[in-house]
């Protein structure tokens, strides 16, 4: 949202939707955020209905309108802000006031610079049901409330302007939508696909698939926070003793190792176990099963958000060591035979990998707190069972130890996480042409901003494997471009087996350990004259609803959105046989993520993606997940060769030249500041200078 007010910084604050409400996050603006008359001291705070939010001289009131009757229970939250009486008023479009539901970008940034481009999602579909129409009219309702509490001719004038603006916003077709129409010649099949996705995302008409399902889940949404205080959780740095549960049938369930489930396991019958899923544990599980040979074991997960779980098929593997490289080996299979899970999805032939899907899945109960259960007969004594094939930090360490021997992979240890785990990056392809030549277009692929999102590391690893392969295509790509790959960004969260939020704090007001390490390295990379052109940030949705690959967010500025569309189209063209959404979940920025920060300060094209190996209709093998990473690399190269790619390259060249220029002027006094502060202040000073020059020519 853009607020035209001198007291509002460029990126003043962010409004983020989480599982338990809407949060306001201070982005380190000079004037800060004032809530109910008091300056907000903390970095972020959950908003309560009726909270008054002062940003500069603009006061906004936070309201949650009563929910309209919805066909299915869905975690929709519509937020209206009402400009307070007596304060300067702002017109907010429906798209601006809704905090969208996507996890990877459930954020609206409030500031005074960026033009308010309407959210494609908000406009893409006519109001087809009550909830949709309630959402559209919520701001109007808020403004009517405003009318009741105010009087005078001035108000009337303001109101006329407001209604005109709303009318205009509602009638104007979305620029993004128009670009999408021209950027890709969609086939009828594609269109049906994207319509289906859109209907699912908007919680609208159910067309296909015709399965009986509760409401589909949105992209990996943070789980609602439970009442249990965080201090109760075991500390990750302390060794966690294995916790065996011995059932009457002799089968034992082991947790308490790296990446394993945290939910309480209780025995409920012969070889039957109940697992109570708490808020933060509801997105992943991993167990070791012992004494299982010849036994049928039943697992019953309670308190499960079934709206995202009904098409989940867990996997099991007979492996000894989850850190060993063969644990995640994936080979092609001749004459593959697909099966179908009892819960509907097509399960691929997994003979080429140690991890196999469990078919026998059933569910009962409500969409938000149901029971999800499955049974599996084991052939061997020891097995692992997981919601997704687990890609653990110790596996990543072993992989990187192996890659260090590879002549084409340059291994960079960026630093350490809060808990002392190494933070690795691999560089493939030179940053510059030989003998101090020009910097090469650079693409960053990073995964696991959220520890529990294992699929994404396979995709990043697939990008690595492809780049290091000896095909002529890979050779040509690495000789022309520079690729940086981080398969595991949040090693601590991954090790603890829960959704963490440690790596989304690129606030210059209060950064975390990892964001300081990462920003310092990338700043140094740019200071050396290198480039940052495209950033892929890989996320993982829970099974129901989303395709194999979907852009979480396109940049809202029209010219930039064009590039997002072009690159996404190349990826969809490359990944034939996968379901790839043509349209993004939404438009927006994620300023406080690594990718959003690189977009903001280095002009990288930011491409956050949701990966889903357990798409409701067809689940993937690990090999297929890796193939998606290869496709992203190939598509990036094709895009960079195109006219569009060259346009981005030139724009970034100019951007970097300006940045280096600014740094020469203002950098001396910022040497001691951390990279987040230094980049922000350097830009601030350059902008202030430019403003002064304009005023007094
Ligand atoms: Zn995520």
Image (cartoon, helix red, strand yellow):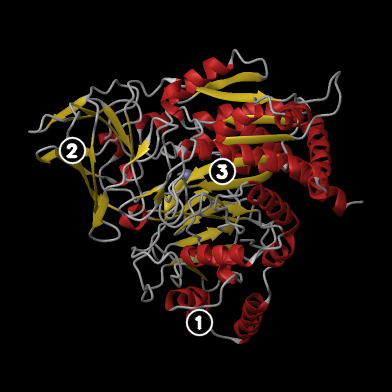
Secondary structure of residue under mark 2: strand
* Mark 2 to mark 1 CA distance (whole Å): 62 Å
Give the number of the mark in front: 2 or 1.
2
Q: How would you rate the neighbour count of disc 3 (Cα within 10 Å): few for under 14, some for 14-19, many for 20 or more?
A: many
Label 3–label 2 contact, CB within 8 A: no
In the rendered image, the quadrant that contains the N terminus is bottom right
Which quadrant would residue 494 be assigned to in this image? top left
Work out whether 486 lies above or below 177. Answer: above
Left or right side of 194 for 493 = left
Give me the residue at 32% from left, 45% from top.
282
Residue 593, quarter of the rendered image: top right
N-term mark: 3 or 2:
2
Residue at disc 3, secondary structure: loop
| Residue at mark 2 | 296
Q: Which residue is mark 3?
A: 592
Residue 618 rendering spot, x and y as whole percentages: 45, 51
For the residues bearing labels 2 and 1, Cβ distance under 8 angstroms: no
Q: Where does the image place residue 600, in percent across and percent down from the top left?
A: 67, 44
Report the residue marked by disc 1.
144
* Secondary element at image label 1: helix
Query: Number of labelled discs?
Result: 3
């Amino acid at each position: 949202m853009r607020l035209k007010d001198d007291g509002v910084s460029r990126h003043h604050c962010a409004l983020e939707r989480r599982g338990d409400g809407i949060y306001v996050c201070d982005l380190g603006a000079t004037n800060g955020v004032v809530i109910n008359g008091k300056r907000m001291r903390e970095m972020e705070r959950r908003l309560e209905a009726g909270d008054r939010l002062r940003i500069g001289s603009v006061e906004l009131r936070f309201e949650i309108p009563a929910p309209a009757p919805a066909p299915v229970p869905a975690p929709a939250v519509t937020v209206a802000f009402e400009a307070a009486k007596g304060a300067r008023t702002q017109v907010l479009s429906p798209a601006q006031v809704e905090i969208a539901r996507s996890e990877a970008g459930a954020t609206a940034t409030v500031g005074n610079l960026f033009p308010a481009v309407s959210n494609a999602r908000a406009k893409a579909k006519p109001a087809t049901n009550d909830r949709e129409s309630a959402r559209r009219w919520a701001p109007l309702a808020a403004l009517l409330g405003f009318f009741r509490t105010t009087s005078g001719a001035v108000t009337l004038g303001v109101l006329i302007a407001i209604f005109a603006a709303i009318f205009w916003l509602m009638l104007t077709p979305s620029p993004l939508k128009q670009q999408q129409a021209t950027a890709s010649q969609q086939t009828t099949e594609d269109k049906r696909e994207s319509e289906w996705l859109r209907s699912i995302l908007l919680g609208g008409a159910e067309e296909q698939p015709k399965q009986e399902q509760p409401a589909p889940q949105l992209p990996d949404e943070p789980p609602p926070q439970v009442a249990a205080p965080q201090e109760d959780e075991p500390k990750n740095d302390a060794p966690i003793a294995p916790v065996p549960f011995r059932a009457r049938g002799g089968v034992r369930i082991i947790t308490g190792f790296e990446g394993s489930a945290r939910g309480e396991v209780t025995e409920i019958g012969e070889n039957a176990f109940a697992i109570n899923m708490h808020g933060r544990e509801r997105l992943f599980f991993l167990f070791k099963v012992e004494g299982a040979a010849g036994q049928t074991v039943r697992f019953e997960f309670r308190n499960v958000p079934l709206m995202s779980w009904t098409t989940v098929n867990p996997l099991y593997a007979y492996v000894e060591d989850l850190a060993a490289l063969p644990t995640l080996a994936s080979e092609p299979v001749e004459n593959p035979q697909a099966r179908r899970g009892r819960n509907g999805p097509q399960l691929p032939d997994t003979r080429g990998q140690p991890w196999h899907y469990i078919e026998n899945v059933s569910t009962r109960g409500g969409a938000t707190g149901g029971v999800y259960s499955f049974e599996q007969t084991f052939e061997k004594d020891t097995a692992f069972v997981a919601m997704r094939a687990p890609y653990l930090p110790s596996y990543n360490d072993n992989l990187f130890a192996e890659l260090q021997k590879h002549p084409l992979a340059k291994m960079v240890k960026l630093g350490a996480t809060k808990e002392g785990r190494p933070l690795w990056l691999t560089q493939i392809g030179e940053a510059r042409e030989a003998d101090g030549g020009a910097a090469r277009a650079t693409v960053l692929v990073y995964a696991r901003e959220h520890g529990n999102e294992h699929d994404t590391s396979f995709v990043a690893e697939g990008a690595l494997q492809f780049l290091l392969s000896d095909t002529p295509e890979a050779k040509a790509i690495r000789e022309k471009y520079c690729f940086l790959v981080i398969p595991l960004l949040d090693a601590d969260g991954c090790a603890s087996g829960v959704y963490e939020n440690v790596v989304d704090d690129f606030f210059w007001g209060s950064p975390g350990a990892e964001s300081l390490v990462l920003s310092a390295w990338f700043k140094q990379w740019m200071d050396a004259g290198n480039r940052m052109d495209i950033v892929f940030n890989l996320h993982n949705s829970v099974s129901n609803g989303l395709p194999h690959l979907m852009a979480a967010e396109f940049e809202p500025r029209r010219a930039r959105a064009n590039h997002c569309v072009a690159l996404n189209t190349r990826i969809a063209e490359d990944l034939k046989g996968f379901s790839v959404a043509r349209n993004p979940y939404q438009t927006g920025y994620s300023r406080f993520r690594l990718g959003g920060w690189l977009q903001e300060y280095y002009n990288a094209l930011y491409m956050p993606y949701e990966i889903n190996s357990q798409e409701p209709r067809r689940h993937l093998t690990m090999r297929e997940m890796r193939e998606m990473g290869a496709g992203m690399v190939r598509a990036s190269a094709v895009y960079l060769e195109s006219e569009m790619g060259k346009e981005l390259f030139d724009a970034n060249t100019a951007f970097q030249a300006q940045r280096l220029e600014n740094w020469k002027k203002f950098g001396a006094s910022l040497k001691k500041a951390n990279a987040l502060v230094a980049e922000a202040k350097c830009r601030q000073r350059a902008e202030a200078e430019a403003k002064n020059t304009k005023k007094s020519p």
